[in-house]
Amino acid sequence: MTALKCLLFPLILMVACPALSSAAGYAETHDGKEFIREMASEHGFDADRLRQWLGEARRNDLVIERISSPAEKTLTWREYRAIFIKPERVEQGVDFLKEHRAAFDRAEAEFGVPREIIAAIIGVETWYGRYRGSFPVLDALATLAFDYPPSSAFFRSELKQFFLMAREQGFEPGQLEGSYAGAMGYGQFIASSYRHYAVDFDDDGIADIFDNPVDAIGSVANYFHEHRWRPGGPVATPLETGVSVPQTLVVGELRPRFTVSDYRAAGLQLPAELADKEPARAFRVEGPDGHRWWLTYHNFYVITRYNHSHLYGLAVNEMAGGLRQELLKASSAGTEHNHEAP
């Protein structure tokens, strides 16, 4: 029950869960000492250097408060959508696409991921790099690794990955900032994702998604490629208002377990171009105009590998759709202008 109390009552957590000395940081706690031993023996880190870094890390109770009630688990789609889907965010996304056109051209060619999907991820995550997080990553990960029992094993692993990433890229651990959960840069990669998917897309010798939008574009595209994005595949279909989906074809997990043919057999009218064998999943959300069912496919599932929430997937999909429309308008306007030119 201790873990449950720590998860549900962050204020109680300050008293009920292990405290630490503000002077010594995490370096002199039992878990901190064990962590230092592991990193020194398994990965060849200098123990004194690690002791210095962990000694400077501080518990942040706001981190625990935020991670205990993420928006994806507490908001309806109508509320969640209002945070991200704004006209100005689409407009700024188009500017971002134009500014980095060459990087998006290359990312599409090398990884097969549409530019609007890449840009939508960066737009939803950090508003195209405007808000990359102000939490010291070392503080956030140490807090979650050592003072948040519900997910301590996961974040202890991420803290290891963080130090490995910093060493590989030549970053100073104490100087890096990100989200309350330790996600970093334009694309908000956690440390393990940074190590596995971040790429040096401008060939300067560093995979820097903190300050380099070109590396961020390539890294997000690589993430989707490695999670088996299918070029040209469908993402999501909103079903007509009033349609009902049989409960036998509704599952809680995000991975699609049925196929389009299963939903057609249940009487759903779906676009003819959808292949019967396409993996599919149905779910219902409360949107701006009431409840609506959606049918989502493999590529939607890939989006939710970035953030395990169908609300997140819908936000990225709608943002991408808005960006696509604006790009098509700009392209059409340019074509008409060229035709009218003397």
Image (tube, rainbow, N blue to C red):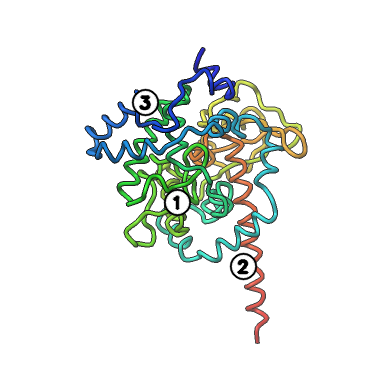
Task: Determine contact: label 1, label 3, CB under 8 Å.
Answer: no
For label 1, count other residues whose C-alpha is less than 10 Å away and answer few (under 14), some (14-19) or many (20+).
many
Mark toward the start of the polypeptide (1 vs 2): 1
The answer to whether 81 appears left or right of 14 in the picture is right
Residue at the far bottom in the pictured view: 342
Mark toward the start of the polypeptide (2 vs 3): 3
Which residue was labeled with disc 3? 29
Tell me if residue 278 can be seen: no
Task: Determine contact: label 1, label 2, CB under 8 Å.
Answer: no
Quarter of the image where one finds residue 46: top left
Residue 312 vs 20, above or below: the answer is below
For label 2, count other residues whose C-alpha is less than 10 Å away and answer few (under 14), some (14-19) or many (20+).
few
Quarter of the image where one finds residue 311: top right
Which amino acid type corresponds to the residue marked 2 in the rendered image?
A: Ser
Residue occupying image coordinates x 64% and y 30%: 74
Which residue was labeled with disc 1? 221
Residue 307: x %, y % from top left? 52, 38
Mark toward the start of the polypeptide (1 vs 3): 3
For label 3, count other residues whose C-alpha is less than 10 Å away and answer few (under 14), some (14-19) or many (20+).
some
Eye-nearest disc, 1 or 2: 1
Residue occupying image coordinates x 26% and y 36%: 47
Which amino acid type corresponds to the residue marked 3 in the rendered image?
A: Thr
Residue 212: x %, y % from top left? 45, 58
The CA span between labels 1 and 3 is 40 Å
Query: Closer to the camera, 194 or 150?
Result: 150
Residue occupying image coordinates x 75% and y 39%: 288
Query: Closer to the camera, 253 or 29?
Result: 29
Residue 323: x %, y % from top left? 62, 56
The answer to whether 270 appears left or right of 146 in the picture is right
Which residue was labeled with disc 2? 331
